[in-house]
Image (spheres, rainbow, N blue to C red):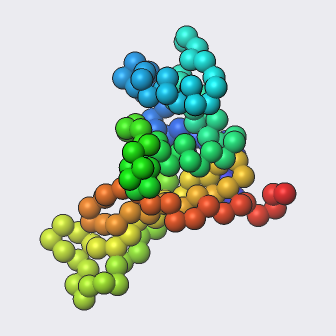
Amino acid sequence: MEKTDDYFETLCNIFNVSNENKHEWDEQFETIYKELGIHLLVDTNPMEIVLNHIYTTDNIGLLERMLLTEDSVDAGTNFSFDNDMDFAFTEFEIGDWSDFPDTEYGLEGYNYYVIHTENFMHTFSHMMPFREFLSLQKSEKKIGLA
């Protein structure tokens, strides 16, 4: 099993924390900080602070909103942060709805992604070959945790 630090690093890579331009997302960070009851501090990386909150408190609701999941988009509660889910890719499952799943655009099926928070493992998916919005498939408590 990966170390906890590796899971947090993966989460940071998904949202490109090292290159985060704070000012590009000021309004969204202000909204999140207000919801969380914290203050935006000068000379800090607001994305890293938000991701640390998500990771340590298992705040899957906020993570879903930041990842533009189907439910958050439908509810109109999503944010528009860039993300790269390739850091969390785990598997591709060929679709069973077609006799010819390999179209001119690529294979039809589902991509699955796993993101860990401190106490849970969250599995997301989206239909291929065109990525629409992610869907949260399940959140499982990690084995061995009380």
What's the residue at 36%, 56% (across, down)?
A: 133
Name the residue at 35% across, 84% down: 96
Residue 49 lies, with reference to residue 112, above or below; the image says: above
Quadrant position of the C terminus in the picture: bottom right
**Nearer to us in this view, 28 or 105:** 28
Query: Which residue lies most toward the bottom here?
Result: 99
Decide: is 100 above or below 38.
below
Q: Which residue is drawn at 49% across and 54% down?
A: 88
Q: Which residue is at the far right?
A: 146
**Measuring 58% from the left and 40% from the top, which residue is drawn there?**
9
* Foreground pick, 61 / 100: 61
Question: Residue 14: where, in percent of width, then height?
Answer: 47, 43
In this orientation, does residue 25 appear?
Answer: yes
State the count of labels: 0
Residue 119 pos. (x, y %): 72, 52
- The part of the image, by quadrant, that contains residue 123 is bottom right
Residue 8 lies left or right of residue 19; in this view the side is right
Residue 3 coordinates in the image, percent (x, y): 70, 49
Which residue of the protein is positioned furthest toward the front in this rendering? 75
The answer to which quarter of the image holds residue 79 is top left
